[in-house]
Image: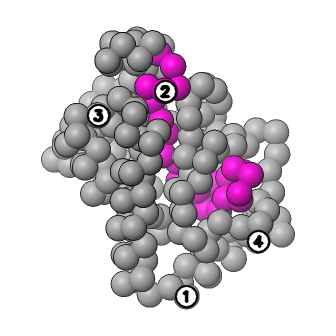
Amino acid sequence: MDKKSLRIYIKEEKRRHPATELSEEDARLCREVLDNRRVKEADVVLLYWSLPDEVCTHGLVEALAATGKTVLLPRVAGDTELTLHRFTSVGDMVCGAYGILEPAGEAVGVDELTRLLRQEKGCGGTAAGMVGIIPGVAFDASGHRLGRGKGYYDRLLAQMPWLYTIGLCYPFQLLDSVPADGTDVMMAEVIC
C-alpha cells in the first residue's frame, strides 16, 4: 500500500474504534510511556500536544513536567519547519498552526539543547539525557514511521541523530510494514 492509501486506511480504521475504547488506550499508553526506562532516565523529553486523531498526550505532558523534567513541544514555523519550545503550563500555550496548542515561549535550538543536556544532572549532552516521543499515522516493528506527509518531524529529527526516539500509537497503527524512503527518520522503539 502506498503512503496516501495507508493514511486513508488508518483514518478509516480509527473510526471503527469507539471514543471510550480510545480513551482507555490513551490512559494505558501514557502509563507505558511513564514506565518506560528511557523516559524515566531522561532529563529532557521532546513530546507533542496531540491532535484529536492522535494518542492523547495532554495529561502526559503535564505529568512529565510535574516530575521536574524539561518538556519540549514543537511549534510549526512556516511551511517546512518545527521549532522546539519549553512547556511551562497549559495557560502559557497559544493556538497555532493546524489548531494545535503550542508553547508561547522562545525557541530552544539544537545547539542550546546540547548545552541544556550538559547542565541537566551532568548527562553530558548525550541521547541518555533526552528522549523524543513522536506521533505518527502508522509505524512498523522495524521503526519505520509514516507521518502526515509534510516531513516536519523528519526534518527536525534529522538535526538530532543522537536522540532516542519512541513512536507512540494505537495498536491498530502498528503494521507489518510501512513504506519509507531515504528522508524518513526511523524510531528506536514503538509503544503501542
Mark 4 touches mark 1? (CB < 8 Å) = no
Real-space CA distance between mark 2 and mark 1, rounded to the nearest whole angstrom: 38 Å
Mark 4 touches mark 2? (CB < 8 Å) = no
Q: Nearer the viewer, mark 4 or mark 1?
A: 1
Query: For the point 82% across and 39% down, which residue is it?
Result: 182
Query: For the point 39% across and 23% down, which residue is it?
Result: 108
Whichever of labels 2 and 3 marks the residue nearer the N terminus, that label is 3
Query: For the point 69% across and 77% down, which residue is it?
Result: 9
Q: Nearer the viewer, mark 2 or mark 1?
A: 2
Q: Residue 69 carries which label?
A: 3
18 on left or right of 142: left
Looking at the rendered structure, the secondary structure element under dot 2 is: helix
Real-space CA distance between mark 4 and mark 1, rounded to the nearest whole angstrom: 17 Å
Real-space CA distance between mark 4 and mark 2, rounded to the nearest whole angstrom: 36 Å
Looking at the rendered structure, the secondary structure element under dot 3 is: loop
Query: Would residue 127 be seen by someone viewing this image from the given angle?
Result: yes
Question: In the rendered image, which residue does mark 2 sit on?
Answer: 128
Residue 112, percent from left and from top: 41, 15
Question: In the rendered image, which residue does mark 1 sit on?
Answer: 16
